[in-house]
Image (spheres, rainbow, N blue to C red):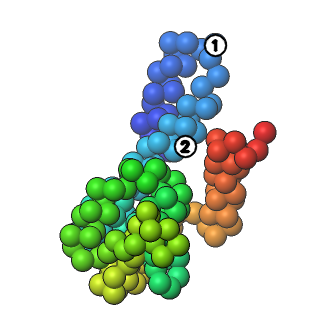
Amino acid sequence: MTTDAVAKIVEQWEREMPELDLRPMLVVGRIHRLAEMMDVALRPPFRDAGLGNGEFDILAALRRAGQPYSRTPRDLGSALMVTSGAITKQIDRLEAKGLVIREADPRDARSRMITLTDKGADLVERLLPEHLANERALLTTLSAEQQEQLASLLLSLAARLEGREG
């Protein structure tokens, strides 16, 4: 059986405290470790394009909104599962790069719309195929069926953590 850093930690705890059920540590520890490793593996194309952490996610959220590729900061935050305040500096940087613009919201003069520029849309359309190829490469050790099973298991866990399921 293949071992990893998480298995070694669990092995040490089993030796020190054999009465504990350490199975959750195997799952949660690996999810944490994989998230960090995947982030590192997926970042280079975005970095090479001059984008900081999370900036591609903002551009992609705008692009997938459909024409005119606009959202309010609140809608963007919801789409990215963060607060609108958490993305303010990223939007500032994207605006400085000419990838988004801020415009008055025609429905509410007190609010602003974040809109993807042509340059921003072109960048998303150029990077997305490479990003998907990188994601696909990360999963090559799993069959299509295993990928579907894993996606389903992760969805169940996410639903529970988000409070959508008892």
- Where the N terminus falls, by quadrant? top right
Q: Callout 2: 10 Å neighbours few (<14), some, many (20+)?
A: few
Identify the element where label 2 is drawn: loop
Above or below, 38 relative to 20: below
Q: CA distance from mark 1 to mark 2?
A: 23 Å
Q: Closer to the observer: label 1 or label 2?
A: 1
Residue 7 appears left or right of 20: left
Above or below, 3 relative to 34: above
**Residue at (64, 56) in percent of width and height:** 150
First-in-chain label (1 vs 2): 2
**Residue at (24, 77) in percent of width and height:** 98
Q: Callout 1: 10 Å neighbours few (<14), some, many (20+)?
A: few
For residue 1, the mark is 2
Q: Position of residue 60 (x, y in %)?
A: 44, 72
**Residue at (55, 19) in percent of width and height:** 14
Residue 94 appears left or right of 20: left
Q: Amino acid at mark 2?
A: Met
| Residue 46 in view, yes or no | yes
Q: Which residue is mark 1?
A: 19
Where residue 99 sits, quadrant-wise, is bottom left
- Where the C terminus falls, by quadrant? top right
Q: Nearer the viewer, residue 134 or 1?
A: 134
Residue 8 appears left or right of 50: right
Identify the element where label 1 is drawn: loop
Q: Position of residue 146 (x, y in %)?
A: 65, 62
For residue 156, the mark is none
Q: Nearer the viewer, residue 3 or 33?
A: 33
**Residue at (64, 59) in percent of width and height:** 151
Above or below, 69 relative to 161: below
Q: Amino acid at mark 1?
A: Glu
Q: How many numbered marks are there?
A: 2
| Residue 146 in view, yes or no | no
